[in-house]
Amino acid sequence: MQDSDYVLEARGVTKIFGNHTALDAIDFGLRPGEVHALLGENGAGKSTLIKVLTGAYQPDAGGVFVDGALVTLDNPLHAQTHGIGTVYQEVNLLPNRSVAENLYLGHQPTRFGLVDHRKMEKAAKTLLERYGLAIDPSSDLGSHSVAVQQIVAIARAVELSGKVLILDEPTASLDRNEVERLFEVIADLKKSGLAIIFITHFLDQVFAISDRVTVLRNGRLVDTRQLDSVSRTDVVRLMLGKDIAFSGATDLEPERPTTDVLLDFKSYGRKRSVHPFDLTIHKGEVIGVAGLLGSGRTEMARLMFGADPADQGTITVAGKPTAIRNTTDAISRGFGFCPEDRKAEGIFGDLSVRENIIIALQGKLGWFRALNRDEQLEIAGKFGEAMDIRAASLDMPVKLLSGGNQQKVILSRWLATDPAFLILDEPTRGIDVGAHAEIVRTINRLRDDGMAMVVISSELDEVVAYSSRIVVMRDREMVAELRGKNINPGVIVQAIANSADEAQP
Amino acid sequence: MKRSLRPLAATAIIFIIAYAASVVQFPGLLSTRVLGNFLTDNAFLGIAAVGMTFVIISGGIDLSVGAVIGFTGVLVAVLISWLGIHPLLAFVIALGVAALFGAAMGLTIHYLQVPSFIVTLAGMFLARGGASVITQDSVPINHEFYSTLTGLIIRLPGGGRLSFIGLLMVAVFLAGALLAHRTRFGSYVYALGGNAVSASLMGVPVARTTVQIYMLSSVLAALAGIVFSLYTSAGYPLAAVGVELDAISAVVIGGTLLTGGYGFVLGTFVGVMLLGLVQTYIIFDGTLSSWWTKIVIGVLLFLFIVLQRIIFAASAPGEKSPEKV
């Protein structure tokens, strides 16, 4: 690797937030004319690295080099003048303005101080034709599909920067045809010598268009590899951690008698979110859900809970066909859901521990059967003790608690409603080891009490430890159901990586 | 037709129908005299509404407009009548004060991240209070320059008169339309109203644009105040109370989306004319209480908000759900 080859390079970039090291001495080089995939789970440091490369953050150590020269990038606009353009997952353009104006905003051609619309639209038309888009440049951007908007965003970024294009999950909201369209555009840009950083969660897409891949984990550089020399399994292993044991198979929990079917999903799905899936869940069973981020795990959980209503398929609860159109329906049928993003979707930070615990129960009871303070205190106290929530007082705001205790508060909230079916999305993320073990113990205890659960987790060892069965998600599709003996994280990694493999023995 | 043009078209059609219906009932409405008075009587409202259009397109609101009109009227009257300053210099001072006032509001809105509603509400109290501190009474203006300006009229066939202030309003509307649709500043205003985050990522100078928008609104409000003092030949601290609300109504009826991002300066012109028509009709009728104006404006406003909701919500863009292949 000669340094002079790189059009954009990060050398020993370190970024520290408080006492959390988000990036730890990352080296990253980008060659002209290559598509370089950047991979990593949530919190691996991908977006932090991108923010450093585009000037949104300043590195605490190390530096960014453009064409071999050290540069200080003040902000994304400044990065643009160095030739670095970015297209974000959410199209950051103006749906209320014309396509042409979105391409040239801030750089509109003017005559006598007035914007020359005709000239601008002509230029826009020529530019878009290069991307194979034959749309009217004077039409509102918002009247076009997300894919078209995405291409317009790319056209703008390339037009204004021209050396490096950073694509931050550009395919997240596109369908398969649109993705192919986008890939053609990327391939053309690559041919013209542009260097492209491609961030995605879809492994298929990485293998479809990338030349090299860099994997980050926990803020550290795991490796940069030539893509034609690695297999899918290697990449998954790099992302999830090399220390995954590929020997020492564990048996899953014994399956329960099939008489106690609690839930039966039949070709249950939602367009653009989750492919229809079939899943039968028995009482006292924990279904582990494995898959990479963005594989549709969370979408499946939200679908089951009615947070996003299904638009196809049927659901049978305890033998009775029902419809779950919203979360109120789900709660009244005894469902509970602990979401992945605790802070944004789980806790009410400013409310007390007590209020956070009783809120779902109160929601279930309705307006007219308000729990009085004594009842609230009793319920909150009972679960606070049972779950070992460590708070100075039940009346302190829940945002002051640690992540593990917050998670226990959310679990208590649902347990207070006496649910028959509980969905846990990444229940152990971002909490300390002790709380982690307690959560896992609680899951085991609830299962033995006969509760049905769906648990999503990136930690494969943990999934194996408590699941009765494991379903594997990939590309928003349920691709495998693993059951029986001899299940270990290695088998799961294999299932995540393989395209067509069915359940392993 | 573009979606964003539809509310404007609806306003124009409603105006034509309403005008035609009024003319059928009172043929006297169709005269150059009435049309000329339309412009003169609504000049101050129209000028203030141009500034308000920019503010609303950018996603904000300016509640200080009416108070700035009142303050400017008092300031100009005091400068001319008490201090003997020439009206032209008084105008320059008043516009300068308003520019600083608007800039202060814009800076507060941008840097302290306070909603424009609150900041301009404070501005409204400041300006109205300031005017009342200077004087509690109406200050008459008797200056020959004022007589000259009000004497500048173009006589139309049929007895109509195009006054200086009426023409000034038309000029402000034309300049405003040019500014909104043909300059970079105009495109930045729309960009802010569309999505402020995207706008800043696309390189829109958000701080500068925000300050300029509120400066523009206050300066135009001050110009409206000058026009109002020409119209009434006096400055009164409680003048133009609630005019900001009339201006907002005219802007919304003219097809500008209250949430920002869409709108036309010339649509506001039609909105102002529609409000003027309602008032003139009620005067012609003679039996109706003038409060009926408020009721009609209320109904119109409600109608247009519903209309915009339907047009903009029914066809949410980019929402197609093709099957995966």
Image (cartoon, grey):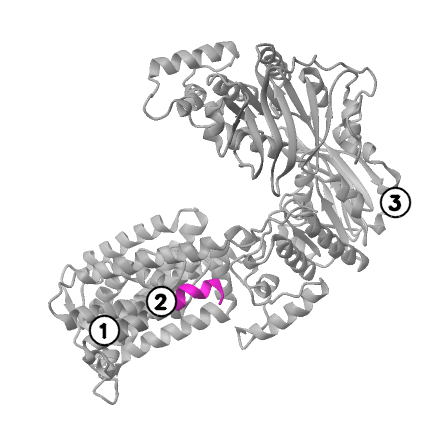
Q: Distance from label 3 to label 1 (Cα)?
A: 82 Å
Mark 1 crowd level (few <14, some 14–19, many ≥20, 10 Å Cα): many
Q: Which residue is mark 2?
A: B11
Mark sitting on residue A16 = none
Q: Distance from label 2 to label 1 (Cα)?
A: 16 Å
Residue nearer the viewer, A11 or A303? A303
Residue drawn at 80 percent across, 51 percent down: A68
Residue nearer the viewer, B231 or B251? B251
Q: Which residues are magenta?
A: B1-10
Q: Is residue B280 left or right of residue B256?
A: left
Residue A383 placement (x, y as % from top left): 48, 13
Q: Secondary structure at mark 2?
A: helix
Q: Which residue is mark 3?
A: A1
Mark sitting on residue B22 = 1
Residue drawn at 73 percent across, 44 percent down: A63
| Mark nearer the viewer, 2 or 1 | 1
Q: Chain for mark 3?
A: A
Is B4 covered by the magenta stretch?
Answer: yes
